[in-house]
Image (tube, rainbow, N blue to C red):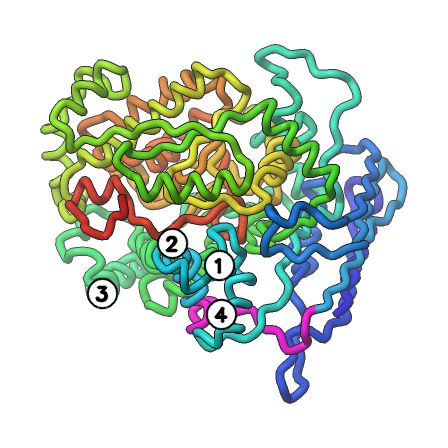
Amino acid sequence: MQMVLRFSVVGLGMMSIIYEAASQENCDDDGACKASSAIGDAEEASSSIALNLLSKKDVTEEIEIGPEDSSVIEGNSVQNGMKQKASVGDGLEKVAETSIVNTASKHCRTALFGSECYKRVVWVQRVGIMEQPEWYPNLLATSSFEKVQKELHNKKEGHCDAPCAEEMDPSVVSGPNPKPETPIKLDSEHPFPEICNSAVPTDTDAIPAAAEMAQQDPKQATSALWTLPESDLDRCFDALVAKKAVDPEDRKYRRNWCWVGLKEFGCHKNIADRLGWAEMQRLSLAAGVTSNATYHPIQKPQVCDKRVFGGMTDWSQSAWSRARSWFGQHVNVYVLSLATGTMRRTSIRTVLEKLRIPFQFVDGVDMRKPDALETAKREGLVPTNYNVEKAQAEAYKPSNGMGAEGSIMGTIGCASGHFRAQNRGFEDSKDITLVFEDDVAPEADFIPRLWRLVREDLPCDWQIVSLYSRCAFGTCVSPHLTRVRPDVNEPAWRCRHGVNWGWQGVAYRTTEIQNLQRVWKPAIFNEMTPRCLDLDVALASVSDRVRFYAVPSSQSPGFLKEMGLGSARWSINTNDTHYIP
C-alpha cells in the first residue's frame, strides 16, 4: 500500500487540504478493500496541522528515518528511507508532504474493539504476559497491540488475522511548533524553555487560535454543561434503575442521569479500552442509558480525542540521542510501591531497566499497619486534624454510594504515598518529577514521546500532566493534550466524580509541587466530600484553580499501559484477593 498526504497551507487564516490515498490494505478475500486508517482521515490531519501552525514564523524540518536501537524499539516496524518535511510561512504558500510506504500484506486486519481477537490481545497485554510468560516468550510488557496480535496469529490463538502495520501519529507531519528566536528570561513568568514550549498558547488562547487555523468558529464550541430535557433525564434514570446501576430512591439527588449512563456504560465498563467519547456514547446508547443529543465531554475532540494521535513515530538516531540527554538532565523518575510488593517491583524494574530509564522506589503508605496513619500525619502527608471516622461515616451514606468500596483507608494510603513521592521529587529538585505506580509498563519509546510532549505540546503555564487519563474531561489544546476542567455536570458534593481517572504515570513541574499541594490537599482531606479522596478526582474537581493537563487514554498506544496486577488501594479497602503483591 502506498499512501500520500499532501497539505497545502496558505497564510494563517486559510487552509486547504488534499487527501490522497491509494490503498490495497484491509482487503477481503473476495477483493473488497477499505482505505487504510494508518494515517487517519483528513479531519484528523487538518486539526493536527492547525495546532502545529500557531506561529507565523517559518519552520522547516526534514528528518531522515533510519534503524533505531532494536532492543528498545521492540515491536515497532521502522520504515527505512521515510522522509518527513514540513514548511509553513507568513503569507506564503508552502507545502508539507509525507509519503509513507506500507509493505503489509493486503490480507491484514487489525482486531476491532469487541471482537474475540481484540479481547484476547488485551488480556495478553494486561495479564497473560505477566502471569504466563512461558506462553508468550516472544512478547514483552512493552509489546504493541499489533505485535501481540501477530504473535497470536502465528500461534493460531484467539481467531486473530495478521495485523496491519501500526498506525502513525499524523500530528508529526508538520513538524514541531517553532521555538522563539530570542532567549527566554528565566523567571517565574518565563520558565526554562526545555520544559515547555512558549510558542504554544496557554489554555485561555489555544482553542480560539486553533479554531481560526482550522477555519472554525470558536463560538460554536459545545458547552461543558450538558443540558437536556427532564423527559430525557427521567428516561435515562429509569433505564439505569432497570440495569441496577442506581437505586430507585436516587432520583432525589437530581443528577444528570444521561451523563451518568454515558460515563458508566461508555467509559467505566470499558475502562481498559482506548475509546474516544464518540464511541463511548454509541456504546451507552446501545445500552439504552443515555441521550443521543450531541455532547463532547472533551471540547474540540477532533484535535486530540483520536486513537491515532497516540500512534507510532519512527524516531531517528539523533532524536533518540537528544531525547535521552534531555531526559537525564531534566527528569527524575520515582516508582511508588508498597515495600511488600515484591513481584510488582520485580516487574516494573525489569521494564524500566529494559528501557534504560533510571528510577528510585518510594515506599507507599500501607494503612493496614497500626501506626501508619499517625506516621503519615507526622510526616505531613495527612493533615493532623483529619477525622477518619467522620469521613468514613460520610462515605457510607447512600448519597455517596461508597458502601461497596469498603473502608477508605486504602484510598487515604494511596494519596499519602503519592504526596511522599512528590516530596521526594521536590527535595531532589530536577525540573520534572515523574511518578509511576508499580503496575504500569511505559511504551518502548516513552523517552522521546515525553521529550516531544514537553518541548512541543506543553504550554508554559503547566503544573502537572497525567500521561494516561481515562474518561478525560476538558478541552483539547494540542494533538496530545487536554486542559482538564471540572465536570460541571456532577455536583460538587460528589467531588464531580467519574472523569479524568488515572494516576499511573504523572509528570509534575517540580517547582510547582508545593503550590499544587496547597490547593489539592484541602480538597482531598475534607471529611464531608469523601469522593475527593481519590487523587485524580480531587485534582480534576479543582482544575479551575490549577494548571492541569492530561493525555487522553483514547490515544493508542500513547505513553503507557496498565498491567493487570490489581489495585493495592482497592485490596486494602475491600480485602480483595485478586491483588498481586
Q: Are marks 3 and 2 in contact (CB under 8 Å)?
A: no
- Residue that label 4 marks: 152
Disc 2 to disc 4, how far (Cα)? 16 Å
- Find residue 547 and report its horizontal and vertical position in percent: 49, 27
Above or below, 270 relative to 478: below
Front disc: 2 or 1? 2
Secondary structure under the numbered disc 1 in the rendered image: helix
- Find residue 459 and report its horizontal and vertical position in percent: 60, 29
Tag 1: residue type?
A: Ala
- Find residue 160 and report its horizontal and vertical position in percent: 50, 74
User: Is any part of residue 487 visible from this angle?
Assistant: no
Q: Quadrant of residue 285?
A: bottom left
- Residue that label 2 marks: 130
How many numbered badges does the structure rendering display?
4
Q: Quadrant of residue 389?
A: top left
Tag 3: residue type?
A: Lys
Question: From the viewer's perspective, is 131 left or right of 367?
Answer: right
Tag 4: residue type?
A: Leu
**Magenta-colored segment: predominant secondary structure:** loop
Magenta stretch bounds: 104-118
Question: Which mark sits nearer the N-terminus, 2 or 4?
Answer: 2
Question: From the viewer's perspective, is 238 left or right of 457?
Answer: left
Disc 3 to disc 1, how far (Cα)? 22 Å
Disc 4 to disc 1, how far (Cα)? 29 Å
